Image: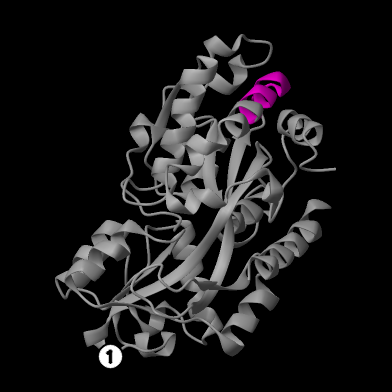
Amino acid sequence: MMKKFIASLSMASLLVLAACGGDDADTDNDTAGDNADAGEQTEGADLSDLFVTVATGGTSGVYYPIGGAISTILESELGIDSSVQATGASVENVNLIDTGRAELAITMADSVLQAYEGSGEFEGKDPIESMAGLAALYPNFVQVVTTEDTGIESVEDLKGKSVGVGAPNSGVELNARMVLEAHGMSYDDINEDYLSYSEAIDQIKNGMIDAAFVTSGVPNATVIDLDTTHNAKIIPIEGEAMEYLEENYPFFSAEAIPAGSYDNEEDIPTAAITNLLIISSEISEDAAYEITKTLFENIDKIQGSHNAAQEITLDTVDVGMPIPFHPGAERYLKEVGAIE
């Protein structure tokens, strides 16, 4: 199963190298850092002089605990002052990197590719080249969540329903648009509601909305929470719709949420996309080298931050990476044989 995931995303990566469960939003951009000049200060600077903001997602998502683990490692192992920042996830995180308000960020590959090409959500804007790759992390699964009592059995059944689509311009929201498109639908067919994971699940519990898009690693804590009080159900994405996604958006691959991830007795077919750790290109090569080396030498601490993070390894560090690696990260990854 993972081989198919890896093969598909690797092909997408190869196509663009010659040239984004993210998470929900509990956003406080004003605290993203008084670090606008931090990247400019890194060249030739001692690591102890750095301040690194790690942009993640909402506090109830998967990005946040992983980002917290990364921040802790930087502080404890390298003496770097660091903070973890809750954000609206992928698109916002790319912009935070570009404006110098974050030095590291977790994003989905689709958002990164679109920003790098100036397409999709970044259409009409100059391509963003202020970011570089540090590592591919783990697959995100598109989870269309509802409950047994709604009678929703397919994405087509969302027509006329109230649906949480994630924070505006988040990776989740971009995925929602694409998945609806693959089923011949758009926001014109649903009553979209821009909600974070936790907000969406609360609204489902209260009967205010019927379903929600949750794109994240599995298991997602908010889906588990829903299942404790309601019979949660995840709607499959398969067949012609999945083929459409793979053909038109090659960063997607056909995957399956494993049986037992929640209370599901069988695998649930759905679309998957890789998550990335990106770094500001303003960070010096030596600093990026030390950061990359230290994170992978302490990978067990990152893997222990969330079940989804257990899939972060050097073996898949380039899978689905649609932009060039930072020279410092590339130097370390070549040293250990992770990339050629």
Residue, far left:
206
User: Would residue 305 appear left or right of 224 to someone viewing this image?
Assistant: right
Above or below — where is 98 with respect to 161? above
Label 1 neighbourhood size at 10 Å, few (<14), some (14-19), many (20+)? few
Q: How many marks?
A: 1
Between 310 and 320, the one nearer to me in the picture: 310
Magenta segment: does it hold 283? yes
Q: Quadrant of the C terminus?
A: top right
**Residue at position x 33%, y 44% in the image:** 27
User: Would residue 251 appear left or right of 267 to someone viewing this image?
Assistant: right
Q: Position of residue 176 (x, y in %)?
A: 46, 70
Q: Position of residue 279 (x, y in %)?
A: 61, 35
How would you classify the magenta stretch by its main secondary structure?
helix
User: Would residue 216 appear left or right of 251 to someone viewing this image?
Assistant: left
**Residue at position x 52%, y 49% in the image:** 310
Above or below — where is 271 with respect to 40? below
**Residue at position x 26%, y 84% in the image:** 148
Q: Quadrant of residue 205?
A: bottom left
Q: How is the image coloured?
A: one colour
Residue that badge 1 annotates: 151
Above or below — where is 25 with respect to 96? below
Q: Quadrant of residue 83?
A: top left
Between 159 and 73, the one nearer to me in the picture: 73
Q: Position of residue 4 (x, y in %)?
A: 69, 70
Q: Label 1 is placed on what type of residue?
A: Gly
Magenta segment: does it hold 205? no
Q: Is residue 196 visible?
A: no
Q: Is residue 210 visible?
A: yes
**Residue at position x 64%, y 66% in the image:** 2
Q: Quadrant of the N terminus?
A: bottom right
| Highlighted magenta segment, given as a residue range | 282-292
At mark 1, the secondary structure is loop
